[in-house]
Structures are given as C-alpha cells and as structure tokens.
Image: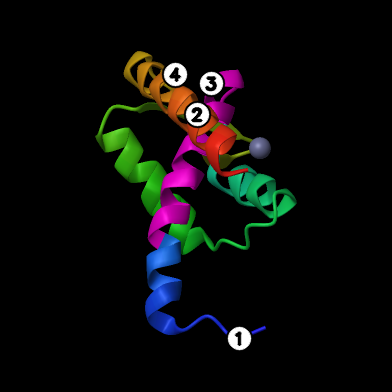
Amino acid sequence: MPEINKKIQKYLNKILNGLIQIHILHHAKQEPIYGSWMIEELKKHGYNVSPGTVYPLLHKMEAEKLLTKKIEFIEGKRRVYYETSKQGEILLRELKDKVQELFHEIL
Ligand SMILES: [Zn+2]
C-alpha cells in the first residue's frame, strides 16, 4: 500500500480531530472523563493519539463552553474531569444526525 504523505497526514489529522471531539462529547455526556482515560478509550478505537493532541482539544472545548471542568484530588493527586455542557449536548445532537446521515450515504 502506498504510504500516506506528510501533507495528506496533516489533512487527515484535521478531520480526525473533529471525530475525536465528537467522541469526547459522547463520553463526557455519559460520565465525567479525564485526559488519560480518553487517550486509552481512543486507543481501543484504533486511534493512536498523544497527550499533545487530546489535552489541547479538551482545553479548547472547555474554553468554548462545550465541556465543563471540575478538579478533584484523588489520593493527593490532582485530576481534571470534564463533562459535556448543555451547549455541548446541543452540538452533539446536531453532529450525531449529520454523522448518521453521512455514514448511511458512504458506507
Ligand atoms: Zn468510545
């Protein structure tokens, strides 16, 4: 199989970032999530993402008020939890419909 070139890889990553954000909204709606948990979850789905990808996305989504943040201390260790906000839920609902429609068409 021909190797994916750097330019295409960059383009792919941009699209995948969108899919990762949908995935984050989905899980953070079910229960509070944290960065390293999300990285593991994405691994299960075949995404090999680094903290350098996931943490900035979480920060951005929190800054955009799509996620709410709460900090907890577990055995003295600080952990930042994120939950999908009301705005995030509205966005997720919209995206779900779009994803479903698209998948129906292309798959
Ligand atoms: Zn998942």
Cβ–Cβ under 8 Å for marks 4 and 1: no
**In front: label 4 or label 1:** 1
Cβ–Cβ under 8 Å for marks 3 and 4: no
Task: Name the residue carrying label 1.
Answer: 2
Cα distance, mark 3 to mark 4? 11 Å
Q: Which residues are magenta?
A: 14-32
Cβ–Cβ under 8 Å for marks 3 and 1: no
Cα distance, mark 3 to mark 1? 39 Å
SS for dot 3: helix
- At x 38%, y 19%, the residue is 85
Q: Position of residue 40 (x, y in %)?
A: 68, 50
| Mark 1 or mark 2: whose residue is earlier in sequence | 1
Question: Does the magenta run of residues contain 30?
Answer: yes
Cα distance, mark 2 to mark 3? 22 Å
Q: Is mark 3 within 8 Å of ligand 1?
A: no
Residue 68 or residue 64, whichever sits in front: 64
**Residue 101 got which mark?**
2
**Residue 83 appears in view:** no
Q: Position of residue 97 (x, y in %)?
A: 47, 23
Vertical relation: 105 (above or below) 10: above
**Residue 72 appears in view:** yes
Identify which amino acid the numbered label 2 is placed on. Answer: Glu
Residue 102 or residue 37, whichever sits in front: 102
**Residue 29 got which mark?**
3
Identify which amino acid the numbered label 1 is placed on. Answer: Pro
Residue 1 or residue 73, whichever sits in front: 1
Cβ–Cβ under 8 Å for marks 4 and 2: no
- At x 43%, y 29%, the residue is 98
| Mark 4 or mark 1: whose residue is earlier in sequence | 1
